[in-house]
Image (cartoon, rainbow, N blue to C red):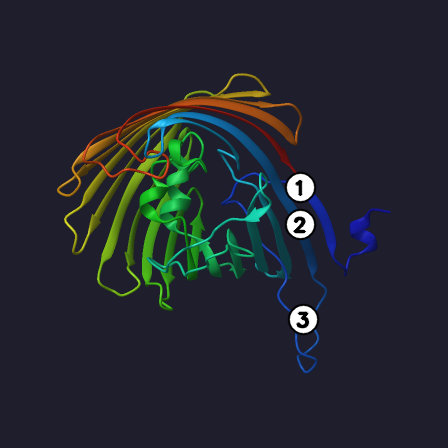
Amino acid sequence: MKPCNVLRHGLVVSAVALTSAASAQSAAPPAAPATAPAQGPSTTNVTIYGVVDVSVRHATHYGPSASTYNSVGDAIWAPSRLGFRGTEDLGDGYKGIFLIEQGFDPSSGTLTMATTSPNYGVGATQGGRAWGRESWVGLVTPMGTVTMGRQYTLAHQLSGRFQPSPNPNLDAISGFSVHHVARQDNMVKYQYTAGPAAFLATVTASEGNGKAWAVGTSYTGGPFDVAAYWQQMDSFNGAETRKILGLGGTYKFTESLKGMVGYMKRTHRVSAQENDVYSVGVNYRATDSLTLLANFLLDSQSKVGIGKRRMAYVAADYALSKRTGIYAEVDRNQLTDRYPTTTFMAVRGTQYGVTTGIRHRF
């Protein structure tokens, strides 16, 4: 007899591979009070999943002395994590859902998602968060899905649709997420899907860390997958508002070859700083096991800190099995004029990097 039949009213726990940081959905709400009317039978499922990924990197032009640097760290694509997601079918098109997901650096065993100071919808957590990647509960209805808690911003969620690898974890090969803020606390998100089109909206309450709101839409049909979004975020003290406009799309040339283009505009209510970010990429599945990726990104900053960042990388990802894989990438970054220095380049100039790693999903 199958386990799901034996434990029809119980909890089914299974290990599955993680497919995307933004794909997680679902699980059951707390049991109803004893005084509540009896409910009909429901189907509940909880999934435990995760990724353990360690990379080794060599980079030139690193730090204040612009010297070479070798490091062992977390993944370059989807970072290491442990998560629980679940769903309860309530009938008539309704479902209770939840997700909690923590990030960690397997090279040291420490929690990630530390925030040194509150700002733009993110609270301060000096030592990291127990469930810092995502932590929310929600309800699926025929009129749309509502989720509440710590969640991905719409800019992060939708911009991933037009990148060869959605918002990479390695700063040296990431370009959009440094501007739009990846996650916010205290968020209420609504999503309604009608055939190939989807509409999304979020409101983030300020609890000393800044309020925010966003709207977005996407369309998937035939070889096209396009998305657009608008996001506004206030600083923790309300003195500044950061505005993000983004749009882009992916075109599937064949079942194996996809090309993508994207654009993002960052402006402010007070500061004169403006950023125009352009991205062109390709994702090619050469064999069932081998995927090749390439991306070029230009970040042009104007009015304040005038300058440019040019980034390019090529990468190969090879699946040894359904769960275990290896990868390698080569990247180049160039900061010119007065473009702000970054965490991986303390001195302007040109940096070359090589990274390789091992990943296991469960």
Query: Measuring 37% from the left and 35% from the top, which residue is drawn there?
Result: 344
Whether residues under marks 3 and 2 lie with C-beta atoms below 8 angstroms apart, the answer is: no
C-alpha span from label 1 to label 2:
7 Å
Residue carrying label 1: 16
Residue carrying label 2: 47
Question: In the displayed structure, would residue 285 be above or below residue 36?
Answer: above
Q: Residues within 10 Å of mark 2 (few under 14, many from 20)?
A: many
Give percent across and percent down for residue 131.
55, 56
**Amino acid type of the residue tagged 3 in the rendering:** Ala
Left or right: 267 with respect to 7?
A: left
Query: Measuring 34% from the left and 39% from the top, which residue is drawn there?
Result: 176
Give percent across and percent down for residue 254.
46, 20
Whether residues under marks 1 and 2 lie with C-beta atoms below 8 angstroms apart, the answer is: yes
Give percent across and percent down for residue 44.
69, 57
Query: Element under label 3?
Result: loop
Q: Which label's residue is closer to the chain start, 3 or 2?
A: 3
**Amino acid type of the residue tagged 1 in the rendering:** Val
C-alpha span from label 3 to label 1:
26 Å
Query: Measuring 32% from the left and 63% from the top, which residue is drawn there?
Result: 210
**Amino acid type of the residue tagged 2 in the rendering:** Thr
Residue carrying label 3: 31
Along the line of sight, which residue is nearer the eye, 159 or 3?
A: 159
- Is residue 25 in sight in this rendering? no
Question: In the displayed structure, would residue 38 be above or below residue 359?
Answer: below
Displayed quadrant of residue 109: top right
Q: Nearer the viewer, mark 3 or mark 1?
A: 1
Q: Which label's residue is closer to the chain start, 3 or 1?
A: 1
